[in-house]
Image (cartoon, rainbow, N blue to C red):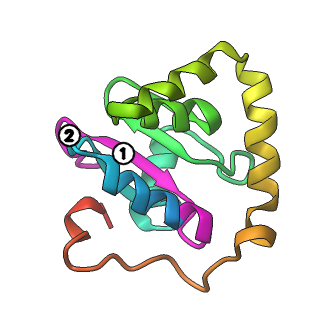
Amino acid sequence: MIDFPKNKKIILFDGICNLCNDSVLKVIKFDKKNNFVFAPLQSKTGQAITKHLKIDTSKIDSIILYEPGISYDIKSTAALKIMNDFGGFWFLSKLFWIFPETFRNLIYNYIAKNRYKWFGKKESCMIPTPELKAKFLD
């Protein structure tokens, strides 16, 4: 049984991907309402959550936004829902909802497929600083 944090949305991400780690740091910066917590897909918590959700990470290599007890989203839909939570000028991200999910995911998949080549990867998952540790489940 996983003890999910109350009133938080969980972002599962590729912990060895430089682009993904940079994106997590950006989410932390813009998450003024403190809505999000994080776990690398490779972590014990990340694996437990994907198992709980019955997600095969060998087939879905993506960001996952999980709202415990409500739903989960992947790929471009997850990214847009995260941005929509920020408020401010991020309201412009709502414009991307006009595109069908299949089209948005074509772009998402292209970037995801090339992320290691373009941005590199780490040997192991990011270790959060002491100030950021509370934002991570693992």
Q: Secondary structure at mark 2?
A: loop
Q: Which residue is mark 1?
A: 10
The stretch drawn in magenta includes residue 3: yes
Q: Amino acid at mark 1?
A: Ile
Measure the alpha-carbon separation of dots 1 and 2: 14 Å
Q: Quadrant of residue 126?
A: bottom left
Q: Nearer the viewer, mark 1 or mark 2?
A: 2
Q: Quadrant of residue 20?
A: bottom right
Residue 59 picture location, percent across and down: 75, 47
Q: Secondary structure at mark 1?
A: strand
Nearest to the observer: residue 130 or residue 60: 130
Q: Main secondary structure of the magenta part?
A: loop
Quarter holding the C terminus is bottom left
Q: Amino acid at mark 2?
A: Lys
**For the magenta stretch, what is the residue range?**
1-20
Nearest to the observer: residue 48 or residue 12: 12
- Disc 1 crowd rating (10 Å Cα; few below 14, some 14-19, many 20+) is many
Tell me what residue is drawn at x 61 percent, y 82 percent: 122
Tell me what residue is drawn at x 59 percent, y 73 percent: 16
Mark 1 or mark 2, earlier in chain: 1
The stretch drawn in magenta includes residue 15: yes
Q: Which residue is mark 2?
A: 33
